[in-house]
Amino acid sequence: MKAIVQERYGPPETLTLADVDVPVPAAGEVLVRVEAAALNAYDWHAMRGDPRMARLAMGRTRPRARIRGRDFAGRVEAVGSHVRQVRPGDVVFGDLGDANGAFAEYVSVPETMIAPKPANLTPQQAAALPLAGVTALMGLRDVGRVEPGHRVLVNGASGGVGTLAVQLAKALGATVTGVCSTRNVDLVRSLGADHVVDYTRDDFTREARRHDVVFDLVGNRSLTALRRALTPTGTLVLSGGGVYGGGSLVGSVWLLARGRLLAPLVRQRIVTLTATPSRQHLDTLRAHAEAGRLTPVIDRTYPLREVPQAIRYLEGEHARAKVVITL
């Protein structure tokens, strides 16, 4: 099969289209023919081994996972032993997690990491949901504890996670403020945001409006500034983000670490988010999508051979919403 393979850390040019063996599903796994895969900030971090401290987990000198990509949608071709909920022919979507491998014609994945594709979404839209959608869902519902009537601010509202977070916050009954650049104001407003702040003109941390939850997806503001946007007992959810800035030792991990240190000392809740995909989360996203409350926004699509160009666009040019690979 064709796959995007990487043998060393580095820029997009280290990614090559190669012929590799079709994976064989082990016990509890299913083989999926990939119809679409989606890019996440995770992919360029893994490609570059950035921040360098993360290489302790990803592989010190080169990536342990040779094939990039996490999110996918496709059709089940075969199942391993002990698979109970999936059959050949089922159309599914899912997240491979740190195992990677979605930028390929086939993936083998545990059945616990996939769910039936939302019936009203295309494969491209469904592939855009797993990691970004679970991040938004966990950040707002599970960690942020958003309830009807809460005021929620999403910093990075036009990104892959942000466009889904705006919609999910509205589905949870919140009044939503989205922060984005001038060119994305109309997009964020069209997703349901009640208020939109253009960060090129206004500083949301200096406004009079205070929020019950601030969901930071950018990592470009200090903890002091972010806390100014909260009510006295509000919740700050930190989830990193950003674009490639030339490499770093710790990256946004430093902001997250400072958040953990400060959390016990202040009345406001400061929580760092690590998205852990599961079938239950995917089922929830499917329910929201099929009810019309959640529709992924796709900025650009690329064929498999152009994954390097797609990642270069994503990591450096402030992509709007999601970038998707079609197969």
Image (cartoon, helix red, strand yellow):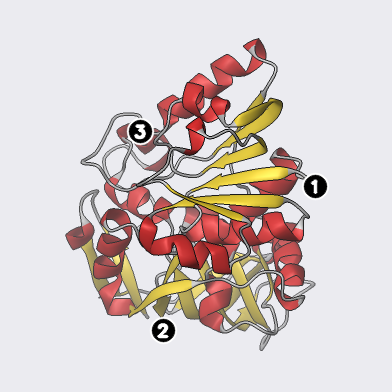
Q: Is residue 21 shown left or right of residue 306?
A: right
Residue lying farthest to the bottom in this orientation: 89
Q: Residue at x 52, y 62 (%)?
A: 188
Nearer to me, 79 or 213: 213
**Dot 2: what SS?**
loop
Which residue is disc 1 drawn over?
149
Kind of residue indicated by mark 3: Gly
Q: How much space separates mark 1 and mark 3, taking CA atoms?
A: 34 Å
Relative to 110, residue 178 above or below: above
Residue type, label 1:
Gly
Q: Nearer the viewer, residue 299 or 204?
A: 204
Q: If you read the primary sequence from the N terminus, does the residue marked by circle 2 or circle 1 appear first?
A: 1
Farthest residue, direction top:
265
Residue drawn at 74 percent across, 68 percent down: 288
Local secondary structure at mark 1:
loop
Q: Quadrant of residue 28?
A: bottom right
Question: Residue under circle 3?
Answer: 251
Label 3 or label 2, whichever comes before in sequence order? 3
Query: Is 269 on the left-hand or right-hand side of 182?
Result: right
On screen, residue 304 versus residue 127, left or right, reads left
Q: Nearer the viewer, mark 3 or mark 2?
A: 3
